[in-house]
């Protein structure tokens, strides 16, 4: 079944898109949310479990204090209020990856509420996204369907359940409806999730690796005729797990819902599945209302009452957040706004920071990463950070230029060698014989040869016309395969001719 779609530009001409995002982040605690089972990536299935993870009769949960601290960190970084008291609730549903038949979550009393975060788009425009709440909960296990196409349950011959992930601490962050972005809604949705990912890493609460599912987004989209109309009916596209997919999913839903509304058909409130391969969403289940989950307070856990002094201590020790860090680095490095934005968009902030630490000046570090290396990465279709060269090596390379041992041109050849796996910059210089010839002996020999070959030029220079000196320098550079210092060659040529 394929949906009727309205071209995106037409859709946002006729309708005002509104979106909301629920982001789940897995916390990088050593143990799970309510028991002592360890949780690290890559363990064999069903080896990180306890009676609590499995929901065995009589097993009792206990709250992970570090997870609470991480949740408070996230709440504070999002400018939320931290609840004086909050509690857990049972969200009841039956699914094989939830062994207790309920998820321990928070319902009417989240640990953090009413915040905001400023989100910068690629061109520097800033939108403020309001946060409704951030609450603590636990992850579910993982079902694997075997025998069908693309890992789907349809057509599978059997299914496996891994409970290692059951009980891993999660924080779920829910935005208020995000309005006012207009045609930039998909872009803002993506940048918001990216902003949160960077924040989680800076806060040290999660590795936040999208490809491992540490960060997962559910995307709500609705349309309304204009910005002063009431909100339209929304759909919720579940588990959109890359930045690019967040943008594509919002875009797709806008085009799909516009076609329904154009045809006078209602948008059905439902969850939808995201299909990475086709870039489409398809209907899931009719959206459950909260009543369907029969939430009730978790009787096995006491309320959490974060000590105010503790909350203030956490606030005082929050690490520098990405936006502040960027401002600081931009000032330190003396980059223009547009230069810094390019560096951020290229994902080169950390690389340049480490290159500067390795002894390169900020301008040189930027020149390497945003020039030669950005071109190489683009050619190979990879991210800068996976190129086989380290910031330390770029720092060493630039120090060779700064000390006069390499010209820029020679340095580019050395870099080529480093990228080709020929070793450290110093080793490539030696192996390829690329060092600037600083000894006057070989230079003078090359100069005398060049002068002898061009007696007319010598006569002109002796007559006071310095224009043709360049021709001699060029010949010397050629003879030394570019390894001469052109300024020194010029000095020597003039000395030679005028003596
Ligand atoms: Mn959730």
Image (cartoon, rainbow, N blue to C red):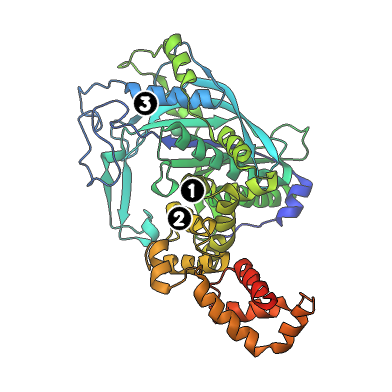
Contact between marks 3 and 2 (CB within 8 A): the answer is: no
User: Where residue 359 is drawn, which disc sits there?
Assistant: 1
For marks 2 and 1 on the same chain, the one whose residue lies earlier in the sequence? 1
**Mark 3 or 2: the one toward you:** 2
Within-10-Å neighbours for mark 1: few <14, some 14–19, many 20+ = some
Q: Nearer the viewer, residue 463 or 333?
A: 463
| Residue corresponding to mark 3 | 67
Q: Image height check: is 450 above or below 290?
A: below
Marks 2 and 1 sit apart, C-alpha to C-alpha, by 7 Å
For marks 3 and 1 on the same chain, the one whose residue lies earlier in the sequence? 3
Contact between marks 2 and 1 (CB within 8 A): the answer is: yes
Query: What is the secondary structure assignment of the residue under circle 3?
Result: helix
Apparent side of residue 121 relative to residue 155 in the rendered image (left or right)? right
Residue found 32% across the figure and 57% down from its top: 156
Query: What is the secondary structure assignment of the residue under circle 1?
Result: loop
Q: Position of residue 186 (x, y in %)?
A: 64, 46
Quadrant for the N terminus, please.
bottom right
User: Where residue 396 is drawn, which disc sits there?
Assistant: 2
């Amino acid at each position: 079944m394929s949906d009727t779609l309205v071209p995106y530009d037409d859709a946002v001409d006729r309708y005002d898109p509104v979106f909301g995002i629920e982001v789940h982040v897995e916390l990088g605690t050593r143990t799970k949310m309510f028991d002592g089972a360890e949780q690290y990536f890559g363990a064999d299935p069903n080896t990180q479990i306890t009676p609590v993870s499995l929901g065995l009769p009589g097993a009792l949960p206990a709250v992970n204090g570090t997870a609470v601290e991480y949740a408070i960190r996230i709440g504070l970084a999002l400018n939320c209020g931290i609840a004086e008291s909050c509690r857990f609730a049972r969200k009841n549903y039956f699914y094989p990856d939830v062994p207790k038949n309920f998820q321990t979550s928070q319902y009417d009393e989240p640990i953090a509420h009413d915040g905001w975060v400023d989100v910068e788009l690629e061109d520097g425009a800033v939108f403020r996204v309001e946060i409704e709440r951030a609450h603590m909960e636990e992850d579910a296990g993982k079902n694997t369907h075997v025998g069908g196409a693309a890992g789907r349950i349809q057509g599978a011959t059997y299914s496996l359940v891994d409970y290692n992930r059951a009980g891993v601490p999660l924080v779920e962050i829910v935005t208020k409806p995000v309005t006012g972005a207009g045609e930039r809604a998909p872009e803002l949705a993506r940048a918001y999730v990216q902003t949160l990912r960077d924040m989680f890493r800076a806060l040290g609460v999660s590795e936040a690796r999208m490809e491992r599912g540490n960060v997962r987004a559910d995307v709500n989209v609705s349309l309304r005729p204009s910005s002063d109309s009431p909100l339209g009916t929304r759909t919720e596209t579940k588990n959109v797990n890359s930045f690019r997919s967040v943008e594509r999913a919002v875009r797709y839903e806008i085009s799909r819902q516009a076609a329904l509304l154009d045809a006078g058909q209602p948008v059905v409130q439902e969850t939808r599945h995201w299909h990475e391969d086709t870039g489409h969403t398809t209907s899931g289940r009719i959206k459950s209302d909260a009543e369907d989950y029969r939430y009730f307070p978790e009787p096995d856990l006491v309320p959490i009452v974060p000590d105010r002094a503790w909350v203030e201590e956490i606030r005082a020790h929050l690490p520098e957040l990405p936006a502040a860090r960027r401002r600081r680095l931009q000032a330190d490095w003396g980059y223009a706004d547009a230069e810094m934005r390019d560096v951020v968009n290229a994902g080169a902030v950390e690389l340049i920071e480490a290159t500067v630490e390795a002894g390169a000046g900020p301008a040189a570090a930027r020149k390497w990463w945003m020039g030669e290396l950005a071109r190489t990465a683009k050619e190979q279709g990879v991210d800068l950070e996976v190129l086989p060269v380290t910031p330390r090596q770029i720092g060493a390379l630039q120090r060779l230029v700064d000390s006069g041992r390499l010209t820029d041109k020679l340095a580019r050849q050395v870099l080529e060698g480093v990228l080709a796996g020929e070793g450290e910059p110093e080793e490539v210089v030696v192996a390829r014989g690329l060092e600037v010839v600083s000894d006057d002996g070989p230079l003078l020999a090359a100069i005398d040869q060049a002068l002898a070959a061009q007696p007319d030029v010598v006569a002109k220079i002796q007559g006071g016309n310095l224009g043709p000196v360049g021709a001699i320098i060029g010949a010397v550079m050629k003879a030394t395969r570019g390894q001469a210092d052109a300024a020194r060659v010029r000095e020597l040529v003039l000395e030679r001719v005028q003596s």
